[in-house]
Amino acid sequence: MNVIEKTGDVLKLGDRDWNWLGLGLLGLPFLVAGLIIGLAIGNVTTLNCQRSNPRTPNQMTCQRTIVGLLGTETLVIREPLMRAIVRTTHGTGVVIFISKIPELELVNHRVIVGSKHEAIANQINRFIQDRQQTSLRVEQDDRLEGFLGGLTFLLPGLIVIVQGMMIPMQIFCEFNKPLDRVLIQKQYFLRGIVTTQTRLSNLQSIDVTQSSLPTKSPAYDLQLHLKPDRPATPDRPIVISSLSTDRAKLQGISNEIQRFLKTS
């Protein structure tokens, strides 16, 4: 908070607050992580296999298709499948062993391994063992997991960014004796300029108050307290500064306002 203009009749103060930008930058990595997780995990993976000749059951052609928001990935497997297992380490999930390829992970992302992966592996193994079964189709739908995983990061990021947008970027305050007016203008990122006016004669006190927000260091703001309309009316102070860890500077501005109000 700084003095912009001071005369015998008018005192103008201005303040620029960068906390809104800091919170926005703090929330941005959460948004990016949420989008990446949602896009990477939210896929539908299918494995289709066909035995071309019942007399040669080991001859088969399989195709793995991964469909997601980023596109479709297709892999054709022309070697016979040997077996399928479920690997829990590193969230691998279903792993397929192929004759000429050491192993192939069914999905291209990490998963929370559970019963559905066991069911998929069992279905693949039954197809391998049952030579009379001519076709196989298994599907692993991870869209819900992708949505929930992305939301885990998106929500905190959005909350932090919204909190930043609730902080004014700029504050202007004018004390005008001839007009008996206190004018406060706060410019927000989304809401634009919000103006508050009150009568200068209604001003009761000016205080530097410590914020209740859980900041790393104690933060303070400058508040105007108005005379109550009725004795039981609760005090609703008007904040005219951004949060600052420099209490001495805000106290100096408070003293400047009080000296201005005392001069005739």
Image (cartoon, rainbow, N blue to C red):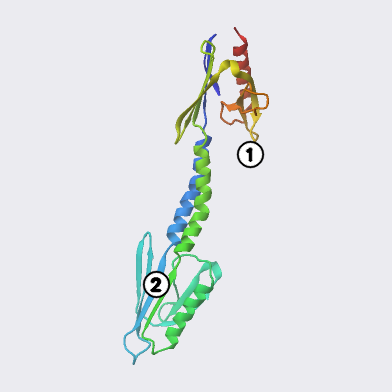
* Helix, strand or loop status at disc 1: loop
Q: Quadrant of the C terminus?
A: top right
Residue 61 is situated, as x and y percent measured from the top left of the image, at 34, 80
Side of 181 where 65 appears, left or right:
left
Q: Between marks 1 and 2, how big is the CA–CA gap?
A: 50 Å
Side of 43 where 162 appears, left or right:
right
CB-based contact (under 8 Å), mark 1 and mark 2: no
* Three-letter amino acid code of the residue under disc 2: Thr
Of residues 188 and 18, which is closer to you in this image? 188
Side of 135 where 184 appears, left or right:
right
Q: Is the residue 255 above or below the residue 32 in the image?
A: above
Side of 167 where 141 appears, left or right:
left
Give the residue at x 45% y 77%. Answer: 96
Q: Which residue is mark 2?
A: 46
Q: Which residue is mark 1?
A: 216
Badge 1: few (under 14), some or many (20 or more) residues near its Cα, within 10 Å? few
Q: Nearer the viewer, mark 1 or mark 2?
A: 2
Query: Residue 73: which numbered mark, if any?
Result: none
